[in-house]
Image (cartoon, helix red, strand yellow):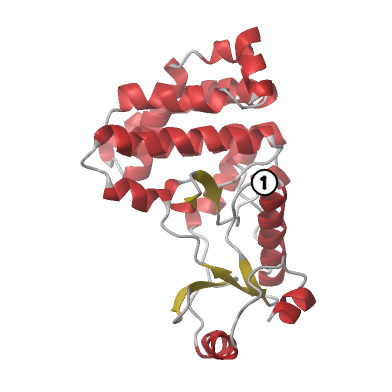
Amino acid sequence: MASLAERSGAPMGERDLQDDEIAEIVRALVESDGRVQRLDLPRRRLWIKRQGGKVMPVFVALQGLAAALFRLPFLRPSPQLAPEAMQAREIERLRAFGKAGFPVPRLVYASATAMVMADAGPTIAEHMRRVRADAAAHDAFLVKGAEALGRVHASGLSHGRPHVRDFFLADDAVGFMDFEEDPASVMPLETAQARDVLLYFLVVTSFAASPHVTCPAALDAWLRHAPIAARRELRALASVAGRILPLARLIGRVHMGSDLRRFIMATEFLMQAPLDRADSPNTAKAGQDG
């Protein structure tokens, strides 16, 4: 199996696959075409992810149109590529995160349009569900995710679609997976990083048991590491999103969907947050030292 990974150009992952495991992987790849498939083997759990099976919602096209009409670069969706190119992009981004020192799922095998990854363990979303009776422990995971996202941005990377269901823990360090989105390919890096923060706060504001405490704590955790350019871009993004807020509230009177509610909550928080402190000498030093 290692030689297969080498021929695919994939990063090396598991090297101790048994013949029966290889047979099960091949059988699953041939017999099923599900986009994401769990494969439970006697010695481990693997995940198969195939490219090309995802139908993009109409919203994505509308998002791109709005980005062009209103000149809002943070709304630009990642370019939709052919399955082979999507696969190459995701593997490249997984490699980049791994080289930067962040835990990522171990890649067992990759063909032109499918990858097989070792199970990374419970996601942070699953950890949060297990401790939901303990509000402090529950919300601590949200702050931990924000701190790790700041480290990602300090490393010159962006995630694209940060969510606790795509974060996991490896020896208490936050790991990342699901690298389909690559907004930095269609916008400046600092804009993609500020967009990461807005998207992550859609999660924080709606999932936090104590949002009035947890939201500022999560923002502070991100600011400790975030680059100055990303901080400034976040302030500008919050201002632009604020101009959309009246329209969002108006639409909400007719139909308040969960995504719209999260956007309103996150935007309201970021508009009121003291983002100007991001340019203070102490905050900049903290980011450099982190």
Left/right placement of residue 9 relative to residue 239 reads right
Question: Depth check: 36 or 171 in front?
Answer: 171
**Residue drawn at (41%, 37%), measured in percent from left and top?**
142
Quarter holding residue 158: top right
Q: Position of residue 47 (x, y in %)?
A: 51, 71
Residue 159 left/right relative to 206: right
Q: Position of residue 209 (x, y in %)?
A: 27, 33
The relative height of residue 267 versus residue 15 in the rendered view (above or below) is: above
The C terminus, quarter of image: top right
* Residue 179 image position (x, y, % from top left): 60, 55
Asked if one can make out residue 21 in the rendered structure from this viewpoint, the answer is yes
Residue at 53% in and 16% down = 275
Image quadrant in which you'd find residue 180: bottom right
Give the residue furthest to the left. 133
Residue topped by disc 1: 101
Q: Residue at x 49, y 57 (%)?
A: 58
Is any atom of residue 243 visible in this view? Answer: no
Residue positioned 70% across, 56% down in the render: 95
Question: Which percent across, then down, holds residue 273?
Answer: 45, 17
Q: Amino acid at mark 1?
A: Gly
Q: Secondary structure at mark 1?
A: loop
